[in-house]
Amino acid sequence: MRQTTPATRWHHITWGSYWAVMLAFAINTGVQAPEGAIIPVITAGMTFWLIQTIVLWAFLPALKQQHPRRLSWFGYVLLIYLPFCMVGAFQPPHLPGALLVLTLTVLFISNAYWVRALKREAAA
């Protein structure tokens, strides 16, 4: 039986929470759309979602390459996202904003532990 390292476990948790954050941004964008017009909302909503997440997409290669320094910078970027998402959590509807804050917090914590585990493996 293959034994998984802590870095591998945190790697999986970080990847899962990364895609959960992307989904939470999409849900938040979809919920805040006005009722009535379907096609313009989809186009504008997807554009708005892409603008919100473009910085997170830029760190996708760092997540794939498992580079500790780039992942540390990813954590700093997540900290920049957090206050804006917290403000959005207090605007109606509250549930999508709260979901976004929760997933972003999980992503930040798992990323921090993943970087720590990667550094420990490199030192060993």
Image (spheres, rainbow, N blue to C red):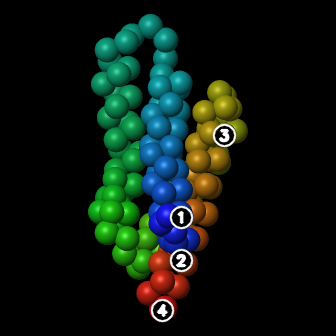
Q: CA distance from mark 2 to mark 4?
A: 10 Å
Q: On residue 98, which mark appears? A: 3
Closer to us: 12 or 85: 12
Residue 67 figure quarter: bottom left
The amino acid marked with disc number 2 is: Ala
Q: CA distance from mark 3 to mark 2?
A: 29 Å
Residue 101 left/right relative to 56: right
The amino acid marked with disc number 4 is: Ala
Q: CA distance from mark 3 to mark 1?
A: 23 Å
Q: Between disc 3 and disc 1, whose residue precedes?
A: 1
Can the viewer see residue 74? yes
Secondary structure of the residue carrying tag 3 is helix
Q: On residue 117, which mark appears? A: 2
Q: Please rate how many residues cluster around mark 1, counting C-alpha atoms within 10 Å: few if below 14, some from 14 to 19, many from 20.
A: many
Task: Give the residue at x 39% y 38%.
Answer: 49
The amino acid marked with disc number 3 is: Ala
Q: Residue at the top extreme?
A: 36
